[in-house]
Image: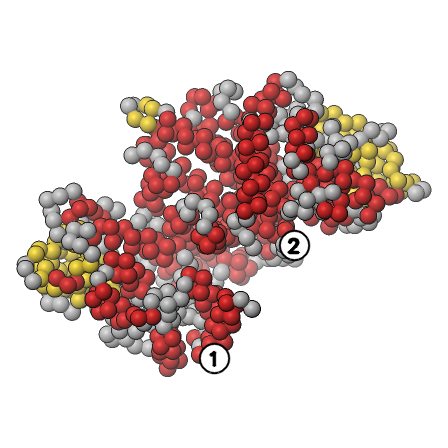
Amino acid sequence: MDAQEAFRQEVREWLQANCPESMRKPPVREEQVWAGRNQSFPSEDAKIWFERMRDKGWTVPEWPREYGGGGLDESQCKILKEEMKALGCRAPLLDLGIWMLGPALLEYGSEEQKKEHLPNITAGKIRWCQGYSEPGAGSDLASLQCKAEDKGDHFLVNGTKIWTTNADKSDWIFCLVRTDPNVKKQEGISFLLIDMASEGVSVSPIELISGESEFCQTFFDNVKVPKKNLVAELNKGWSVAKALLKHERKLMSETQDNAGPNISPVMAAEHYVGKDANGKIVDHALRDQLTQHEMKFRALGLTHFRSFEERVAGVGEGTIPMIMKYVGTESSKSKEELLLALMGTQALGWEGEAFTSDELLVTRGWLFSKALSIAGGSSEVQLNIIAKRVLGLPD
Amino acid sequence: MPLVLNEEQRLLKDTASEFLNSQAPVDALRKLRDNKDELGYDQPLWQQMVELGWAGITLPEAYGGLDFGFMGLGAVIEESGRRLTASPLFSSVVLGASAIILGGSEQQKQALLPAIASGETSLALALEESSHHRPTLISTSAEKDGDNYRLSGSKVSVIDGASAEQLIVVARTSGKNGETNGISLFLVDGKAEGLTRSRRWMADSRAVADVSLEGVSVSADSVIGEVDKGWEILDATLDRGRICLAAEMLGGVLECFERTVAYLKEREQFGVKIGSFQALKHRAAHMYTEIELAKSVVLDAFSAIDEGRADLGQMASLAKATLNDVFYLVSNEAVQMHGGIGVTDELEIGFFLKRSRMAIQLLGDSGFHRDRYASLSGY
């Protein structure tokens, strides 16, 4: 048995022995375990699962062991992911620190910053949010205005960030701030870590068409931030941001772990449209729409896999990651529209007894999905990037 | 399920590319067309391909083949698709030889496979009876006549039907039109009495023929597989055909797309390169994403053949439907983005446009394959 197979065996056995039965299915929204100073667990099992994975270093398996990670390489991480998926294990811990800030610190942070912040992420002690967009700086992120003035031993931050996901539940925020207003816009931006408990920080949730208020506006009113919270050099924050956007897009292109409604398009077609005596969906147009989606979905999965294979084999041009945010989010949106088409008015309920909780989740999910092609770099921006960096089309 | 070519396969692809660049650029097809070449392909070119071993890539070593697998053949076919190369590789090796390998008797294998690998003989599958791909709508009848069978009926658009040495004729020995039961496969000599073949001149300039059978007599051992039970062999053969055709189409897609992007970078209007216009950038970028998805699908489909996977049928329908749609899009956009010259005969894009639509119709359009995919998936 080779090393990889041995590792897989080891992982499988450990998961079998350590993942509580109730943790072997995707969590509904309320059951998700997030990091935080006020961390709470929906059940004893969730707490046990988190603690065991944390102690094993598997809340963030790909990070170095010295920061509380698992020290696993890419192939090992893939094996762990596969084995967790096979057993149905949910992620033990969720946090932007894992997906976004951590990678930034690993690449650009000082050793002190890594020692201060990474262990708190792997141990789930601190919850992070992202302060990028502003009311006047969305697609044109580089035009951001929230400023950080050098006051000797600290920065003084004034301004506002918008679309900060879960800012009202977060402990720290990583922000792009303007530290030089007199140069080309990308060259006057710094990457600053701010404690949300600092004096002068306030948060206001924004209600979306889906009824959720995950996104917030965050206000900074003369907030004092220690100099040591500057990541990378002064005015070099844009490079850090660009590196992180790649991670955010990768994240958005992969299917989420959390439980959406328990309705797949095929199930929806069977239940709400119906099949004939030969087992065919009776509405031919909807059947064709369903098939188009299923085919696209399969092609997407194969492309994810091909990207991984190319990386491992060291072949190909590595361009697949550049298309995945666009194709992934557009495909997710079409899936929601397909569910609506298949479920008819049962997918258009807002609340109440006439609808099952799954049906209501479909409605909300469809509405929220409109954000997918806008957030994290809109589809239009993605196409611009592909045109420029992959196809080399001129400015 | 490898979705990347291994080193040997990459080498084969590169060799094919170099060879075809010098021996069979798109201009070769233009010449065949302008000369109204009866054969429909260049015999010396085909000989060279045979010498390179292409006709034996998927044939078993025991019968003179290379046992190199369909992934390798797919790479060669993709390169031919880039250049719209006309040859009997598809008709004889992909369709013909596959049917023999999948369902032929030992005798048939010995008689035909080494000869196909060496280019000495050629096969063509005579299936269609209408203007769409309808593999179960078979009216051509095969009546038992002592120890023989008498075949009567008409076949249309048989790929390389007029030039092939032998035909594999799909006929009905029992059952009703539309049923899979009762379909049988017969080997018929191209010069058999009662058989007439005539070249049908298509917009894509590739050779297909109409075949008429009037009481063509064949012996019992010309049946491939068992009487009434030809469907499984036929379906598996068609799936290999669909996937290989998808590979050819992928080649055409890539060539069209690359030429179009090159044109966007070169053509100037209003003092700038037209590639700087955002509308064109977005359409080109969108096409790129569709092409990348299509590549993944074709690669996995070839893996499905080589690994004998149970989902081969689904993968064949996925590959063909995907390439149908992508080639349709890319060929249309290629013409449009080239502006005025896009509709001239001089520009080679027109050849790709024409081939795209024929390739879409051969072995199943998207409606056919989405229906099939859904049925195979249980909905």
* Residue A102 x, y percent position in the rendering: 29, 63
Q: What residue did someone put label 2 on? A: B308
| Residue at 78 percent of width and 40 percent of height | B112
Question: Alpha-carbon distance for marks 1 and 2?
Answer: 36 Å
Whether residue A206 is visible here, answered yes or no, is no
Q: If the image is split into quadrants, where does the N terminus of chain B sit?
A: bottom right
The answer to whether dots 1 and 2 both sit on one chain is: no
**Secondary element type, mark 2:** loop
**B144 on left or right of A250:** right
Front one among A387 and A10? A10
Residue B4 as seen in the image, left or right of residue A250: right
B220, above or below A176, in the image: above
Q: Is residue B127 left or right of residue A233?
A: right
Question: Few, some or many C-alpha atoms within 10 Å of disc 2 (few <14, some 14-19, many ≥20)?
Answer: few
Give the amino acid at mark 1: Ala
Identify the residue at horizontal 82%, vertical 29% (top origin): B191
Chain where mark 2 sits: B
Q: In this picture, is A35 found above or below B73?
A: below
Q: Is residue A99 above or below residue B6?
A: below
- Quarter of the image with the C terminus of chain B is bottom right
Q: Secondary structure at mark 1?
A: helix
Instruction: Please tell me how crowded label 1 is: few (under 14), some (14-19), or many (20+) other residues with Cα within 10 Å.
Output: few
Pick the residue in front: B141 or B281: B281
Residue of label 1:
A17
Task: Write the residue at 54% across / 38% down.
Answer: B14
Tell me which amino acid carries mark 2.
Gly
Task: Report the residue that reaches farthest toward the right.
Answer: B146
What residue appears at the point 17 percent right and 54 percent down from the top-left corner? A233
Q: Residue furthest left?
A: A152
- Looking at the picture, how far across and down is residue A373, in whole percent? 35, 50
On the image, the x and y values in percent for residue A97 come to 28, 64
Tell me if A170 is positioned left or right of B121 in this view: left
